Image (spheres, rainbow, N blue to C red):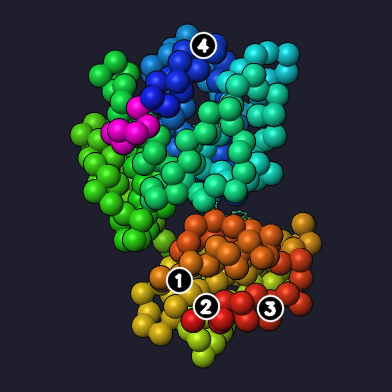
Amino acid sequence: MIKQYKKIYKSILNEIIKYDTIAVYRHTSPDFDASGTQNGLVTWLKDSFPNKKIYPLGKDFIDFTPRLYPHIDEVSLDNQDFLAIILDTGNSERIDNQSFKNAKSIVRFDHHPKVETIGHIELVDDSLASCSELVLDFISCFIKKYPLSPLAAKYFYSGIVGDSGRFLFSSVSIHTFEMAELCLKTGININKDVYLPMYEKDFHDLEIQQYLLNHYVLTDKGVAYYVLKDQDLKELNLRTEQGKNYMSMFSNIKGINCWVAISEDKEKGEFRVSLRSKEKAINKVAEMFRGGGHAQASGAKLSSLDELPSLIEELNKLF
Ligand code: AMP
């Protein structure tokens, strides 16, 4: 356990004990860490406090449900006192379901660089590889009284491997492995329960990779990017949020310093941008284009492709 957080962990547990209704939130367009932490915490809360009403909030992400995480029911929290626990979200407008604003008390666990205060109790540590790692650390403080079940461990483990790039990123530490150990000790089968549903690909994915290898652009500064316009997405049978799923094929290539996926969101009239980098921090560039995130993994938005040359220019300047 991270010693300096012991006091704050106790005050968070007191808030949990105080409320009969607890709603657990994460960011929109969830990734493995957002959904894994949410489902892990919801499962642990339900196991530990069977008489409380515990609700996960947010829209289902069809790539994940039901393959990895269960369906989320819609609930109304009107006219009741509840505790909101917000996970893995740096800025309040990205919280999936804004009903957290009506909560009597708000607790936040996050590992993004702090840009905003959202909760009454905030635990934000951007040195940690994943939000799952932070919430598991909190749970480890009370694990004798409130044990971790294999189901909760499976969810948290998916968050750890998702946001640490399968233990590859520089944010991985001894603590990351200690929290993974906590999950493994519950007896989960990581191959069957976690890696297979997370990473299994099919021939359609191979065809998309082939298309992207034929269409990506590489600048002389080592910035690689691909653009999927609405028409491309339709032809490839992809949804906007799936456009970024193929970026990792550029991650270990000598000569590529930073790689970017740009996918059109026709409904919103914008382009979603995912940015990844080997070493240099790219989150400041993401912030210049309506986004943010971590040093090596950020997201942003372009209102049109007219902004693409300036995005690429800003990235080129880093190398
Ligand atoms: P993505 O490329 O969508 O996987 O996002 C990478 C990281 O950047 C995640 O930690 C996201 O939470 C964060 N992120 C993505 N989009 C935004 C945004 N518009 N504003 C702030 N952070 C973002």
Q: Which residue is mark 3?
A: 310
The outermost residue toward the top is: 51
Q: CA distance from mark 4 to mark 1?
A: 44 Å
- In which of the image's four quarters is ligand 1 placed? bottom right
Question: Which badge, 4 or 1, comes first in the chain's sequence?
Answer: 4
Image: magenta residue range: 1-6
Q: How many residues crowd mark 3 within 10 Å: few (<14), some (14–19), many (20+)?
A: few
Q: Position of residue 288 (x, y in %)?
A: 66, 65
Q: How many residues crowd mark 4 within 10 Å: few (<14), some (14–19), many (20+)?
A: few
Question: Which badge, 2 or 3, comes first in the chain's sequence?
Answer: 3
Question: Which badge, 3 or 1, comes first in the chain's sequence?
Answer: 1
The outermost residue toward the bottom is: 220
Magenta-drawn stretch contains 315: no
The amino acid at mark 4 is: Lys
Question: Which badge, 2 or 1, comes first in the chain's sequence?
Answer: 1
Residue nearest the observer in this picture, 149 or 192:
149
